[in-house]
Amino acid sequence: MENQTTDESLHNVTHVGGMYESWFLDYASYVILERAVPSIEDGLKPVQRRILHAMKEMDDGRFNKVANVIGQTMQYHPHGDASISDAIVNLGQKDLLIETQGNWGDVRTGDDAAAARYIEARLSKFALDIAFNPKTTTWQLSYDGRKNEPLALPMKFPLLLAQGAEGIAVGLSTKILPHNFNELLDASIKYLRGKKFELFPDFPTTGGMVDVGNYNDGKRGGKVRVRAHIEEKDKKTLLVKDVPYGITTTQLMESIVKANDSGKIKVRKVVDNTAADVEIEVQLAPGISPDITIDALYAFTDCEISISPNACVIVNDKPQFITASDLLRSSVDYTKDLLKQELEIKLAELEDKWHYTSLEKIFFEKGIYKELEQKHKDWEAVLTAIDKAFAPYKKNLKRAIVKEDIVKLTEKPVRRIYRLDINELNEQIKGIEGEIKQVKHHLANLVDYTVEYFEGLLKKYGKGRERKTEIKTFDTIQVQQVAIANTKIYVNRADGFIGTSLKKDEFVADCSDLDNIIVFRKDGKMLVTKVADKTFVGKDIIHVDVFRKNDERTTYNMIYVEGKTGVSYAKRFNVTGVTRDKEYDLAHKGEKNSKVHYFSANPNGEAEVVTIKLSPNCSARNKEFDLFFETIAIKGRNSMGNQVTKYPIRGVKFKEKGVSTLAGQKIWYDPETGRLNTEERGVYIGSFEGEDKIFVAFKNGTYELTNYELTNRYESNDVVYIEKFNPDKIVTAIYYDADKKQFNVKRFRIETQTLNNKFVFIKEGQGNYLEMVTTHTQPVVLLKTGKKRNPEEEEINLAEFIEVTGWKAVGTRIAGDDLISAELLSEDEDPDPEDDSNVQGELFS
């Protein structure tokens, strides 16, 4: 008996593993569906939906304490008040569905909202317009079965894309970036019209700049780069004017301090001046370049961040990963379906109203109400008599008469009979028929009706919701180029060690801990390795330096002997890119006895002269001769090179410094990023070497001379003209004089030589701006004045119109304030490929 009981007990045992598997799956499903991931229908998480429903129940047009809203919401949300409070503050800070009053915190600074008992909220007019209609809402019982709550709000707007969403569930997460209100409505209209549309993120609470090149329509795996605007107040001060999305001013300042402490940048002080607008003042250390520091701030601090969107939403009670465009299409289709439901409900209501009004008219006009005065057996007989009296008129009605219709007629007060105006009823019927016709027209043209609906939202609520985040193409910052040299590299040539800790050995160069070091050895081997405390790279080091990737100007001159044949070769080569910590053989086949006789590194391709002395015991007739490296072409590092001699070399000595064998560095300006480059992006400026300069003119009427360092930054929105500086060229400029309401022209030569200082060359004054500038020798412009539809045109040769004066001169009037445009007609002179002094700059509008 005991054994039988034991067997039954064992048979009914539930293993812990099975319980865990079942319960955890239930928990994961609950978190995904009920807490973390928004629904595709209305774009809301359950807590947000319950907050809005509770606020609609409380809505009387006045503000309510948030504490009261939380209490009302707790009737529907089976969690604590803290989660509801956080969710309502988050909704309020988005400034779309909820109007706020009091201290609701600041997403830019990270300041928290005041306690719920101190702040107030109410639904915005926009929310009332788009999110509520009990007639089209599907209801469900609340968690305790006492009340009904919406399964999904009838949301007639792509709310999820407008607000964005973020949530971490069990096993998955969602991150949908916010988009611009007006652009979403425009895209919705385009979709309905069958046109193509594009959606890009917009961060209305923080602004900044965004590079959407890899946004990939918000798909999982895409990425956007977000930057703060950084302005140069002066040569010693930078101003950060906003914060990237999701970053607070405190976090940003801490990241700057951290980068300074780790030696990536050098700043003297960071001050938070944020009030109505964000402003973080970064005071630079003495001698630090503002341009390089701006790059370093983007590279090493939270002034630039990357955000990876991950659009996960609940579709048919299951999580799905979709695109931003799919979200918009789904929302527009849902809106169109809701509008159709509203029209169908309204049509049914109108037809009921028409039916009853027609009955009322017949009831009184034909005297059917008199049946109430007749003596009938009972009330049912009265109703039957009235129904029978309606018989001749039933064919004119749109549906059958039911008992409820007759009962309703009999409930009319007697005074209504005496005050009855049949004409008034006829007018009511006529008006109802007009409304029915309009509703049927909308149903037959549902797409047009939906377009009209979105256009109405745009007109009513679009003002003040313009794009805040500037879409730009960002340049790729090489961190090694902008990192401050925060350490030193040393070398022990004999033992073969390099590193930052070998302070007793030979100093090589200042560097950053992000740099790579290139090493050449006596045996003809080369390698590149990362900066470290101490690294063994091989004995007999002949050259070590900081490695610059893609450097096509640094040229290495080398003479080596091949171990197998004993023949010596000379070669010239660049090292632009290698695999880190991999040894490369430069002495051709890397034979055992190969070795380097002579090695030099030349930053601009200089080709020196060396004297080669042969072994005195060899049979060569001439045992000493000069080698001119300029006669050897620059080839790849794997090339054998040119044969120097088959006899043994005793020694090679430097004889004479050579000139550069490279042409000047060809520079382009990319107006998208405002940066110089050598990759042929944008406008060709010229070939630069030595002390050459760049001339830049800006919209505010200033010019600046700069060097041609690729780290230079130019605010692309402000640049009007850029070219290689030629002091012999004459600058011609047309600018607007706001004081006299006219356009002036002037011609002058650049007389200043100071670099990186802006000089005003137009008349100073508020509202003055540069219209056009050129350095063409014979600038001919087409002036258009008068009305845009029918302008007057005049061609003027400005070289003949005005003489050359000083750069501070005011100039001469050329047009009134009715100038529409000034178009340069002169063709560019044909530039000589070897002499780019005639290359014209580019005018940007």
Image (cartoon, rainbow, N blue to C red):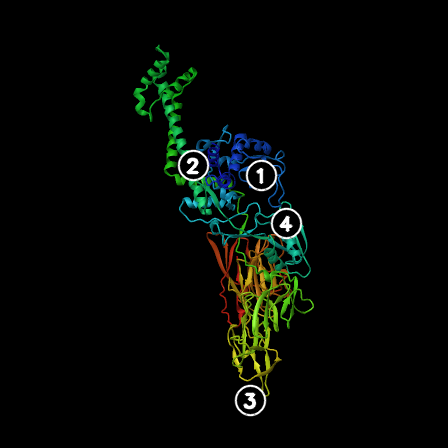
Amino acid type of the residue that numbered disc 2 sits on in the rendered structure: Leu
Answer yes or no: is residue 201 visible.
yes
Q: Is residue 368 left or right of residue 481?
A: left
Earlier in the chain: of badge 4 and badge 3, it is 4
Amino acid type of the residue that numbered disc 3 sits on in the rendered structure: Ser
Secondary-structure class at tag 1: helix
Q: CA distance from mark 3 to mark 2?
A: 101 Å
Marks 1 and 2 close (CB-CB < 8 Å): no
Residue 580, horizontal then vertical, whole percent: 55, 65
Q: CA distance from mark 1 to mark 3?
A: 92 Å
Marks 3 and 2 close (CB-CB < 8 Å): no
Secondary-structure class at tag 3: loop
Amino acid type of the residue that numbered disc 4 sits on in the rendered structure: Glu
Marks 1 and 3 close (CB-CB < 8 Å): no
**732 or 356, which is in the foreground?**
356
Q: Say the numbered circle drawn on residue 338.
A: 2
Q: Which residue is found at the position 52% from the left and 67% from the top? A: 839
Count how many numbered circles sit on residues in the image.
Answer: 4
Examine the rendered structure and indicate whether residue 373 appears above or below residue 329. above
Examine the rendered structure and indicate whether residue 249 appears above or below residue 353. below
Question: Which residue is labeled 3 in the image?
Answer: 619
Comparing marks 1 and 2, which lies closer to the viewer? Answer: 1
Q: CA distance from mark 2 to mark 4?
A: 45 Å
Earlier in the chain: of badge 1 and badge 3, it is 1
Q: Say the numbered circle drawn on residue 107.
A: none
Residue 193, horizontal then vertical, whole percent: 40, 45
Q: CA distance from mark 1 to mark 2?
A: 30 Å
Comparing marks 1 and 4, which lies closer to the viewer? Answer: 1
Question: Which residue is labeled 1 in the image?
Answer: 86
Q: CA distance from mark 4 to mark 3?
A: 78 Å
Q: Is residue 250 left or right of residue 589?
A: right
